[in-house]
Image (tube, grey):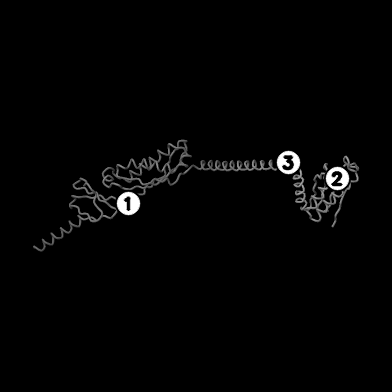
Amino acid sequence: MMPLLLFGAFFIAVFLFSTSLKVLREYERAIVFRLGRARNQPLGPGLVLMLPFGIDRAQVVDLRTKVIQIPTQEVITRDNISIGVDAVVYADVSSPTDAVLRVEQYMPATLQLAATTLRSIIGKMELDEVLAKRSEINLEVQSILDARVEQWGIDITAVEIKDISLPAEMKRAMARQAEAERERRAKVIMAEGELQAAAQLTEAARLISSEPAALQLRLYQTMVEVAAQPNMTIVLPVPIELLAGGAGSAGTPAGTVGQLAATAAAAIAKGLSDGDKNALPAATASTVSGRRIPVVINPISCSAHLTGIGLDSQNNT
């Protein structure tokens, strides 16, 4: 009989001892209630011994960072535009005792408070501010929320807005606005380019007008460049002194004028046929005396006709 009693007593002792032990992980703390009263300090981590028969009851608190998802909140901004905003809150338990004793369920309570704070802040802002100041909104929500939940033993480490949903018509309006802004910038850049080009052309015209020979050289250069194109007839003025019918200028015989004109026409045609770019300016320059008459140049036939005096020069090489 005695061994049986000893065995029963040993079995009861082992059972009571096993129910009095609790193992807590590194990130866990236990708030122990002894006969309904909370002990001053939380227990853990490691092996924790509590009194059996319900004298000690423990509530375990996880100290790891909590990720609280705020579902999409329908918010009306200050300029009466309805948008959807969802965010995420990162929270730590800084005081396990306060998290258990001061609020019934600290996670749902923090979630509800974060959602109402987010709606309140965004409702005071216009849509453009909400889109442009997301970082400022995150910091303001974190600051207000952290001050409110500090008494619960909760520390808010970060608040991040995940997405802002806009109505379809608002997206289309913003797209049109962005397109108009791009067109405006393009027109401004084009106008600035035209202004700079006009300034450069004005400066070039001033320099050319101060040197008459520069304008003539520019004309010759253009003639050479254009004459290289096939199937083209070029009409341009050549400054020579000419009187139709044989009369020259004062002190210039008519025969001399006609000879100069013929020489100019022959030189122009030779320059076109031989490809000698130097022959054209030199020969024409020799005929320059004052007046201008039109010259018709045909690169295909390599001919030049001085209109008004009936002189032609052909080079069919």
Mark 1 falls on what kind of element?
loop
- CA–CA distance between discs 1 and 2? 100 Å
The residue under label 3 is 210
Point out the image quarter for the N terminus.
bottom left
Residue 132: where, in percent of width, then height?
A: 47, 42
Q: Quadrant of residue 198?
A: top right
The residue under label 1 is 64
Asked if labels 2 and 1 touch by Cβ distance under 8 angstroms, the answer is: no
Q: Amino acid at mark 3?
A: Ser
Residue 247: where, in percent of width, then height?
A: 90, 41
Which mark, residue 281? none
Determine the residue positioned at 41% across, 38% down. Answer: 121
Mark 2 falls on what kind of element?
loop
Mark 2 or 3, closer to the camera: 3
Which residue is more in the foreground, 247 or 314? Answer: 247
Which mark, residue 307? 2
Counting residues from the start of the chain, the first of labels 1 and 2 encountered is 1
Mark 1 or 3, closer to the camera: 3
Q: Amino acid at mark 1?
A: Arg
Counting residues from the start of the chain, the first of labels 2 and 3 encountered is 3
Q: Is residue 252 left or right of residue 169?
A: right
Asked if labels 3 and 1 touch by Cβ distance under 8 angstroms, the answer is: no
Q: Residue furthest front?
A: 251
Q: Is residue 211 left or right of residue 77?
A: right
Mark 3 falls on what kind of element?
helix
Counting residues from the start of the chain, the first of labels 1 and 3 encountered is 1
Q: Quadrant of residue 109?
A: top left
- CA–CA distance between discs 1 and 3? 85 Å
Q: Amino acid at mark 2?
A: Thr
